[in-house]
Image (cartoon, rainbow, N blue to C red):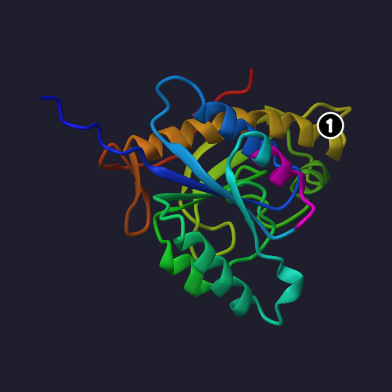
């Protein structure tokens, strides 16, 4: 008699806006052999299109409207309670535009991934594309990292570069970077679900060994 297969890791996504990275993850999760399943999508904005994407994929959704809370701590406590109802093994921030409290991050340590539109540690925070242009950078890109208490400062798992053309503006550069995000994020999520990446004491462990530099996808 065959043993039942091990349950797939449960993925919960958090988004705030249009959800293009969410869609990339949904599409990847529907591919044959993908090692995880998206069980729910949470959002802090009731009208975000990410919720429509989730509904079209027949995924459970929930909304915790940040405007209804007097403090970041109260919002995060409610968000945490909603997340825990779904028993996720992994939480992916897919354009989730909220700074999370220390208590929240510590509660889910090693289970939180984020996508950031720069080659970290360059350009933490907002307006990364314009900042790269203003600095005269010839390369820009995206980073996928574990979330820690430091804003955009958790250990980086993987990065993908894009070339900055002389005629690029912030909008065109954002489009280039977003295209890389849609490729890279599902790859990293797959690695997590396969047990290949973990958050160590202060670094990423890849196949059990410390990752000294982020995995890279070259520009093409």
Split into 4 quadrants, where in the image is the C terminus? top right
**Identity of the residue drawn at 69% across and 28% down:** 179
Q: Residue at (70%, 36%) from the top-left corner?
A: 20
Percent coordinates x, y for residue 124 in the rendering: 65, 55
Q: Depth check: give the residue in front, 93 or 65.
A: 65
**Percent of width and height locating residue 199:** 36, 52
Task: Please tell me whether mark 1 sits on a helix, a strand or a loop.
Answer: helix
**Which residue bears the numbered disc 1?**
172
Residue at 78% x, 46% y is 135
Identify the residue shown where x is 61% and y is 42%.
119
Q: Is residue 178 above or below residue 129?
A: above
Q: Is residue 189 magenta?
A: no
In this rendered view, identify the residue nearer to me: 13 or 195: 13
**Residue 141 seen anywhere in this rendered image of the structure:** no
Residue 166 on image: x %, y %: 85, 27
The answer to whether 134 is drawn above or below residue 29 in the figure is below
Examine the rendering and report whether any part of residue 35 can be seen: yes
Q: Would you say residue 51 sits in the magenta stretch?
A: yes
Which contiguous range is marked in magenta? 46-54
Q: Residue furthest left?
A: 1
Q: Is residue 22 above or below residue 62?
A: above
Main secondary structure of the magenta stretch? helix
């Amino acid at each position: 008699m065959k043993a039942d297969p091990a349950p797939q890791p449960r993925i919960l996504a958090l988004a705030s806006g249009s959800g293009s990275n969410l869609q990339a993850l949904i599409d990847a999760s529907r591919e044959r052999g993908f090692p995880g399943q998206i069980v729910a999508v949470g959002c802090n904005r009731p009208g975000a299109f990410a919720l429509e994407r989730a509904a079209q994929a027949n995924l459970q959704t929930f909304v915790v409207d940040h405007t209804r809370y007097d403090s970041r701590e109260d919002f995060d406590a409610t968000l945490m309670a909603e997340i825990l109802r779904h028993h996720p093994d992994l939480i992916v921030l897919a354009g989730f535009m909220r700074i999370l409290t220390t208590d929240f991050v510590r509660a889910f340590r090693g289970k939180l991934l984020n996508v950031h539109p720069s080659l970290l540690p360059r350009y933490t925070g907002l307006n990364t594309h314009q900042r790269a242009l203003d600095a005269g950078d010839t390369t820009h890109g995206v980073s996928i990292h574990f979330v820690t208490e430091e804003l955009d400062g958790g250990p980086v798992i993987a990065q993908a570069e894009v070339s900055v053309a002389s005629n690029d503006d912030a909008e065109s550069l954002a489009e280039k970077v977003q295209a890389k995000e849609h490729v890279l994020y599902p790859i990293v999520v797959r690695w997590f679900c396969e047990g290949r990446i973990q958050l160590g004491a202060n670094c990423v462990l890849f196949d059990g060994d410390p990752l000294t530099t982020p995995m890279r996808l070259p520009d093409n």
